[in-house]
Amino acid sequence: MADTLSADQKIALIHENLQEVLKPEIIEDVIRKQDRPLVIYWGTATTGRPHCGYFVPMIKLAHFLRAGCTVKVLLADIHGFLDNLKAPIELVKFRAEYYRYVITTLLKSIGVPIENLEFVLGSSYQLSEKYTMDLFRLCSVVTEHDSKKAGAEVVKQVANPTLSGLIYPLMQALDEEHLGVDAQFGGVDQRKIFTLAAEQLPKVGYKERAHLMNPMVPGLQGGKMSASDPDSKIDILDTEEVTKRKLKKAPAAPKEVDGNGIISFVEYVLLPVNALKSGGKPRFEVPQRNGDPLVYEDIQTLKNDYKEDKVELHSQLAPPLTLSPQTLKPAVTAALCALLAPIQAEYQKSREWQDITLKAYPPPEVKKKEKKVKDKGSRHPGGAPPPKEPILEPRTEEAAQTETQPDGSIQGPKKNEVNLATGVEVAIEALDVNKVDGAR
């Protein structure tokens, strides 16, 4: 397809649906003047299990590939470890392999050719002598303040952060040089790291790159879609039953569009994916209980109808057509389950993918509860026998003459034996406490 596109068409496809582009002139220079494929990379830290929000960058990767770009996918295993230990070091290798399976299958499921797609494992070059020396050089020109600021929206923020969070954005900047790319692609939350790269790489002798940013997609709960929040996202391998339950629980207030995770999913995933698969206009249907389905080819019309909570009738005899949470949620559920079905079928067929999943995300150990022995009491059949009464020796005349004085001292023939008594009962019996003045 790229061979039939003009330079203008390639550039338009690269820019499609992006929220922001920094240094677009670099892209134009490569495509128009140098007349070669744009080399671009997208990195993902291999931490939690990928969710349906990953369809959003996959759609852009599809645009890049169709525009003839060479696309490198960085499986950033070391970044995953550096980000507050989100990925334990012993699991990052397996998680990187799991991500490779997911990304490849996602692209294939939406009909994207991957001949020009290259996977690169971060640790394959980030541990080299040259990369390490470059990192030291970058550390010598970037302040702690600038590095912390750059990673504020990407690196997990904690009360007592480690130094690894400062290294993370520096490595992401260096990756542009060591991957040999013209541009880096990511979410708009990466903007501060992109700015850091543009400002600091020239200081260590490397050129500035272009940066392309996707809008951030709200999660099902309205906030940021996060792999660490199960209710904010739907896992690629979630069953149909789990998918239905999560979408049913998702808040979607009638007539409210802003922060509506269900509508955002239609806008950023379902409509663009349908356009890619059909090779034409996007299309999304909302079935109606009585009558033909509502058909949408753009998100603005859907948002307007949702705000009105109704659709104007074309005929007085036709049944009412409504776009509300009660009609939108089932439509999104059906469309998403259909989108995930071929991916999950591929997973079920691949024993290797299943094995790597267990290694990458081992199920938590179930601690066995210790069985508590019930105290049945002494009168219950099988219970513990009652404690034996202490056997006391009969008191002698000398013992009877041994008394406790008002000052607490013991006087009498047996005072030494009382002081060395081996039990409380014996000591008390040896002392006639009732003879002490003032005893109760």
Image (spheres, rainbow, N blue to C red):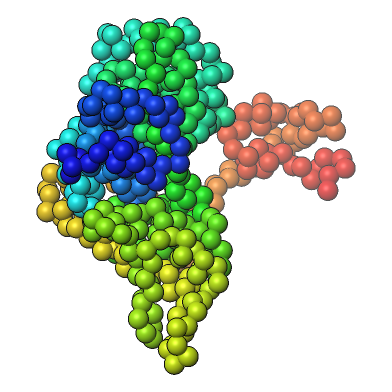
**Residue positioned 40% across, 8% down in the render:** 204
**Residue positioned 15% across, 53% down in the render:** 346
How many circles with numbers are drawn on the protein? 0
**Residue positioned 53% across, 23% down in the render:** 148
Tell which of 295 and 128 is nearer to you. Answer: 295
Q: In the displayed structure, would residue 175 be above or below residue 417?
A: above
Q: Position of residue 160 (x, y in %)?
A: 55, 26
- In the rendered image, is residue 391 in sight? yes
- In the rendered image, is residue 367 in sight? no
Q: Position of residue 45 (x, y in %)?
A: 34, 33
- Which image quadrant is residue 94 in? top left
Q: In the displayed structure, would residue 150 be above or below residue 377?
A: above
Tell which of 249 and 142 is nearer to you. Answer: 142
Q: Split into 4 quadrants, where in the image is the N terminus?
A: top left
Q: In the displayed structure, would residue 139 be above or below residue 1?
A: above
Question: In the figure, is residue 153 to the left or right of 423?
Answer: left
Q: Position of residue 176 (x, y in %)?
A: 33, 21
- Which image quadrant is residue 62 in? top left
